[in-house]
Image (tube, rainbow, N blue to C red):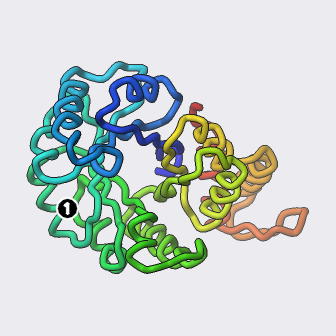
Amino acid sequence: MSAAAPLTLLYVPGDRADVIRKAAVSGADVVIVDLEDAVAPDRKEYARSATVELLSDPPSATAAPVHVRVNDEADVLALAGLPGLGGLRLPKITHAASVHHIAALAPGVALCPLLESALGIEHAYSVASAHPQVQAIALGEADLRADLGVREDAGLDWSRSRVVVAARAAGLAPPAQSVFPDIRDLDGLWSSCARGRALGFLGRAAIHPRQLPVIERAFRPTPQEVEAAWHVVEAARDQAGAQALPDGRFVDAAVVAQAQRTLALAERER
């Protein structure tokens, strides 16, 4: 699952057709058309109709999958069944019942509930495991920060870990990190991605194409990590059971599984 999970997800405003066209060729693994936070209230009807038109044709074989972050049930009903729809991102989910309701309105569509409040975090596992259509969960850090009154970034680490654990417990791929809001601070983005990777996240949502290469590089295994993983896998082939490598590292089944995930992620197409 880790090898198949997207590393880069690019948000684009649903009322900006020109930006959506650029996003489609940006190299992002997934394009997320945002009908919620990125669209002004007086433009939401237009954004919905434009997105319906966009997704009414089957997707190109070379185009990134298109997901849509919706506002409400009306958006879901308008989009469900469109051939170009790759998935729905559901904001401000707090209970599994909401996921079941959306799944009934959009049968067969991949769902990604967004946990953006203290209540959503408390119910992270029940939301993640609510329905077979749930393919991922994600954290909405801006709303969660406001809900908790958190000012320092480290104040969200417990919630981040909770979402990572809930995804794994539900059998989902590791979640992608929330967006980094400063599109000019690429060094800060890199440091934040490194912190997220250490917490168990895989990949990240972006709000500008210039963030994509940084995210991609941050979550790809380094050559040193690939070499170390290769040695672990080779050692496991030669001798079954727990063992110590010449450099002193102890290898057991869990270490081998982690090494295999590293190699699978390194070998996926860019």
Would you say 119 lies left or right of 238 here? left
Query: In the rendered image of this protein, does residue 12 appear above or below residue 163?
Result: above
Residue placed most toward the observer, 250 or 71: 71
Q: Position of residue 211 (x, y in %)?
A: 60, 41
Give me the residue at 45% from left, 72% from top: 145
Residue 224 in view: yes
- Residue 229 image position (x, y, % from top left): 73, 52
In the image, 76 versus 220, the foreground residue is 76
Which amino acid, mark 1? Val
Please name the residue that numbered disc 1 is placed on.
99
Q: Is residue 107 visible?
A: no
Which image quadrant: the C terminus? top right
> Which residue does the image show at 16% across and 32% down from the upper left?
49
Side (left or right) of 205 relative to 126: right
Q: Is residue 219 above or below residue 50?
A: below
User: Where residue 252 sits in the image (x, y, percent)?
Assistant: 68, 68
Q: Secondary structure at mark 1?
A: helix
